[in-house]
Amino acid sequence: MLPRRKEAPGPRRSSPIKIAFVDDHPTIRQGLALAFEKELAFNVCGEAGSCAETLSLLEANPPDVLLVDLSLQDGSGLELIKQVRSRYPAVKMLVYTMHEEQFFAARVIRAGASGFVNKAEGLDTLMEAIGKVIQGRIHLSPAMTDQVLSSSLGGKEGGELPSPRDLSDRELEVFELIGQGKTTHQIADLLHLSIKTIETHRENIKRKLNLSTHVELQRAAFFWVLDRP
């Protein structure tokens, strides 16, 4: 006998919430699909592992909610969010990732997503977040909500040290790739940008983080990547 599908936390609707998953790990996508297919409130309508696959999915069958990881096979989840917001404004987006909320939450909201959930959180938290997103609300952890509000009201406090949070979205992406040991040429190829543009980003990162040399930049980026989950 098959287990009965159950009601999920979140808003009651006359029709199920159409949801799709974007993650570069097939096992993550399959696990999410299995979990959400058991919930009466949801209808899984697709999955993708890359930016290109996601845009094809949206063209064929746009969901109500798109669950997006920040690291994809062919690019950045942040850039994908911006593209989806521009092309499919009715699609709600929720970031579901292992990246640190303190560095990325405000960025994904600015890019066009409606919330951020770390993969370490339970399924109930994820479904609660989706419920908020469907209602047109923003979902962040309580600690992150306080930080974003504090930042928007007062900016940085005096004496605060430079941080990767001060970098633009593209600069942070370049900083992460530097920390992964990628060369300027490799970063340019991965991001489909010119070598000169990457070099400009590197100089801007050094200036914003108070770093004097390329060696200091590489060391700072390496330890930042090493410190993350």
Image (spheres, rainbow, N blue to C red):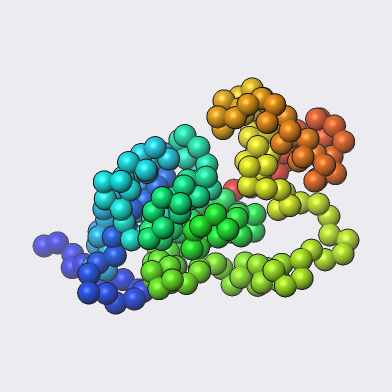
Counting from the top left corner in percent of width and height, residue 125 is at: 44, 67
Q: Residue at horizontal 87%, vertical 64%? A: 158
Q: Is residue 12 above or below residue 22?
A: below
Residue furthest to the bottom in view is: 12
Counting from the top left corner in percent of width and height, residue 153 is at: 72, 72
Choose between 45 and 102: the one closer to the eye.
45
Counting from the top left corner in percent of width and height, residue 192 is at: 55, 29
- Residue 20 in sight in this render: yes
- Residue 27 in sight in this render: no
Choose between 148 and 82: the one closer to the eye.
82
Counting from the top left corner in percent of width and height, residue 170 is at: 63, 42
Q: Is residue 90 left or right of residue 200?
A: left
Q: Residue at horizontal 76%, vertical 66%? A: 155
Q: Is residue 225 above or below residue 137?
A: above
Q: Is residue 83 above or below residue 132?
A: above
Residue furthest to the left in view is: 1
Quadrant containing the N terminus is bottom left
Q: Residue at horizontal 85%, vertical 32%? A: 213
Residue furthest to the top in view is: 185
Q: Residue at horizontal 63%, vertical 35%? A: 177
Q: Is residue 188 left or right of residue 4?
A: right
Q: Residue 186 appears in which quarter of the rendering?
A: top right
